[in-house]
Image (tube, helix red, strand yellow):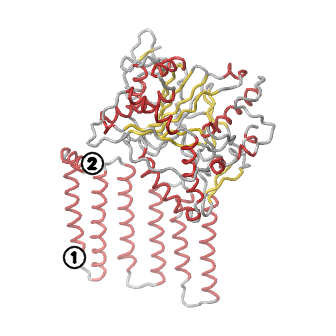
Amino acid sequence: MSYCVNCGVELDATAAACPLCNTKVYNPNQPVATEVPTPYPTVKGAVEPVKAKEFTILMTIILLTTAVVCVLLNVFTIQIGRWSLYVVGICAMLWVFFIPLFFPEKTSIYTNLALNGLSIALFLALVSWLHPNNNWYEHIALPIVILGTLLLEIIFIFVFMLKSSMIVKAAVSMAAIAVICVATEMVIDLHLRGYFYLRWSAIVLTCCVVIDIILMTIYLQEGLRAEIRRRMHF
Amino acid sequence: MTLCRFPTFQVAIRKGLFWRYLEPNHRPGPYVQPDIGNPCMPMHFKANNRYLIRIYYYEKRISLEVFHSLSDGTGALYFLKTMTAVYLRLLGHEIPNGEGVLDITETPKPEELEDAYLRYASSKIGRPRSQGNAYRVRGTKEPFYTLNIICGVIPVDKIRVVSKGYGVTITEYLNAVLLYALLQKQKSERPFHERPVTLAMPVNLRSFFPSETLRNFISMVYPSIDPRMGDYTFEEILQHVHNYMRYYINPKFLNADIVTNASVQQNPFIRIVPLFLKDFTVRRFYTHVQDGQSSAGLTNVGLIKLPKEMGPFVERFDVLMGQPFSARTNCAIVSYQNILTVNFTSSIKETDIERYFFRKLVQDGIPVKIETNRKMEE
């Protein structure tokens, strides 16, 4: 048997270091046993995924019934235009939004985000088909939806995939806000006037750039970060 | 075979409009499964065929995990002992009932299923719930689902001699050592404001009220040391814990504690609050108030007895407290024959509390053997 030279406790034959102080075991008379089983299993467990079957069925029936009833009302009773198509579109969009709750173990956050973007784009396409008016869909709605989805994907990658610090995550989010505001003003300007001139988005852009510069300065200056951490009691 | 004798364990938890409730569960299971390195994982109420218990095996060890709303340590121990006895009988050994092994052929007694809190809540006043904020251990959180275990195996005769030498019981001695370890930890952090070091310790109420319930029947006491009053020596901590236990752990004080808990449950205004509001409030109360009122949890299940025919097959018992919400370290103690085990469980990387604790035992001349599921860093 080996004892920790630092703590004085007896160690398990399979222990390569003391669990209390991490001092390595050097015992020429008894090397660390690798053949005998360890006191605890090495396999890590994971909770069995919960199947949301009942919830999926319930929500699908609710959305489907709403859509079908509205179509029937539109066809037989309230025959003013094709209003029921809006309800059908919204129901389909909501079903796509609920996918992460229906199949929690199968879908990734990035796929869900892309699907959400696609469903919004398709819903707006439906609206544009019902109101074919001066190409607003191709010139404004579609570019903003595509850009918004891409930016959200980038933010989520920084938040969940890359082990970046809080400061970097905040800086990326601020940059995304600036980009989406400028892009929104640009597509609206180009659509309405045919030229682009920065107005309200310039204010947002300035604020975001200032905040980003401050954040990146804090991030790059280790001393400054430590100082802020102390003052803010992190 | 065993589960039919324990209807309080054969249940599923369901969501009502105002509260959650337990209902009998006749789904297949729960199935015995190979043990894992991170036990006491969170329980999804809908997973595991809605059972709120898990049974594992590893080498020569049987493990039982129980969701705390079903039962406390004593109730779970009845289940584990009976299940082990049934297993040994299936292997062909003659194991009698008694000493916590229940007869699986008899029907469950109504006393075993009762809510003993309501039966014994007779005090006219309750005791205040708040203990004041305590020192909170801070540490580097491990990824979700990690439960770090450090187990100390100690000979009972050696620890009994030492605690007798101090003139206290083994529980009081271990309580004092844990308070001492927490005080050392707080001191090493050199805080600007020191805080009282408090333990949350469950007391088995069956020792004070004649109940046979297999459901929860515990109350909490909070032994505490306030370092703002000055530096305590280990002997002073022992004296304080010894007096605290004598003063607070008696039927009158414990009854008042039961009344405090039962009054919340029975209050008609609280009962009609919808469940989602209750969930939100209770969660916030626990994480912001209750969790901050103790520095660590300590439970002592005590000395376990078994029918002597089971003796050759059982080497030792271990008790683990589940994954804590915060960065704290919880400690669970149990003894069987001449082996006492102290299991520390935490979700943080640091092992300072455990180190101070076991080093103090070694300093007092108690031999300790350490086992862990941690992967030590190179």
Write the residue at 56% across / 82% down.
A84
How dense is the environment of label 2, judged by Cα within 10 Å: few (below 14), some, or many (20 and up)? few
Identify the secondary structure beneath mark 2. loop
Question: Alpha carbon of mark 1 to alpha carbon of mark 2: how far?
Answer: 40 Å
For the residues labelled 1 and 2, say whether their Cβ atoms are less than 8 Å apart.
Answer: no
- Above or below residue B362? Residue A62 is below
Q: Nearer the viewer, residue B97 or A204?
A: B97
Residue hosting label 2: A233
**Circle 1 marks a residue in which chain?**
A
The picture quadrant where one finds residue A63 is: bottom right
Tag 2: residue type?
A: His
Identify the secondary structure beneath mark 1. loop
Write the residue at 22% across / 60% down.
A211
Image spot of residue B37 (x, y percent): 53, 34
Please, which residue is most extreme toward the top here? A29
How dense is the environment of label 1, judged by Cα within 10 Å: few (below 14), some, or many (20 and up)? few
Tag 1: residue type?
A: Arg
Q: Is residue B337 left or right of residue A34?
A: right
How many marks the image carries: the answer is 2
Residue hosting label 1: A199
Image spot of residue B59 (x, y percent): 61, 25
Write the residue at 52% across / 35% down.
B299
**Circle 2 marks a residue in which chain?**
A
Image spot of residue B280 (x, y percent): 49, 59
Dot 1 or dot 2: first in sequence order is: 1
Q: Nearer the viewer, residue A69 or B111?
A: B111
- Above or below residue B207? Residue A32 is above
